[in-house]
Every structure is written in structure tokens, then in C-alpha cells.
Image (cartoon, rainbow, N blue to C red):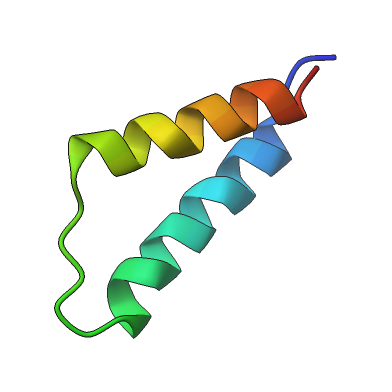
Amino acid sequence: MALTAALKAQIAAWYKALQEQIPDFIPRAPQRQMIADVAKNAGR
């Protein structure tokens, strides 16, 4: 089962919300990779 566009948008919104709501949040490449891996496995 592939990820739908809606689910991809929701995951992106959650990640953006983290950046906005957590003081001193610094986005890092490993965080994005972890989210991508979780999303990929959620789509299985």
C-alpha cells in the first residue's frame, strides 16, 4: 500500500508543527530520514 498524498501532507504538517511548537527545535537530516523511514513502513 503506497502512501496517499493526503497522508504525506499530514506527515509534513506534523513535522512543521514540531518546528513551530518546540522552542529551539533544529531540523536535522537524520530526523527527516527517520520520519521518511517511518512513513515508508506505515505505507506497507
Residue at the (43%, 35%) spot, across then down: 34
Q: Position of residue 14 (x, y in %)?
A: 52, 61
Residue at the (32%, 43%) spot, across then down: 31
Q: Identify the image quadrant of the N terminus.
A: top right
Q: Looking at the image, which residue sits at the far right?
A: 1
Q: Position of residue 20 (x, y in %)?
A: 31, 77
Q: Position of residue 36 (x, y in %)?
A: 48, 29
Vertical arrangement, residue 13 with respect to residue 37, above or below? below
* Residue closer to the observer: 37 or 19: 37
* Residue closer to the observer: 39 or 12: 39
Residue at the (27%, 35%) spot, across then down: 30
* Residue closer to the observer: 40 or 5: 40
Q: Identify the image quadrant of the C terminus.
A: top right
Residue at the (30%, 69%) spot, across then down: 19
Number of labels in the image equals: 0
| Left or right: 36, with 43 as reference point | left
Vertical arrangement, residue 41 with respect to residue 15, above or below? above
Q: Splitting the image into 4 quarters, where does residue 43 fall? A: top right
Vertical arrangement, residue 13 with respect to residue 34, above or below? below
Q: Splitting the image into 4 quarters, where does residue 8 fall? A: top right
Q: Splitting the image into 4 quarters, where does residue 6 fall? A: top right
| Left or right: 29, with 42 as reference point | left
Vertical arrangement, residue 20 with respect to residue 8, above or below? below
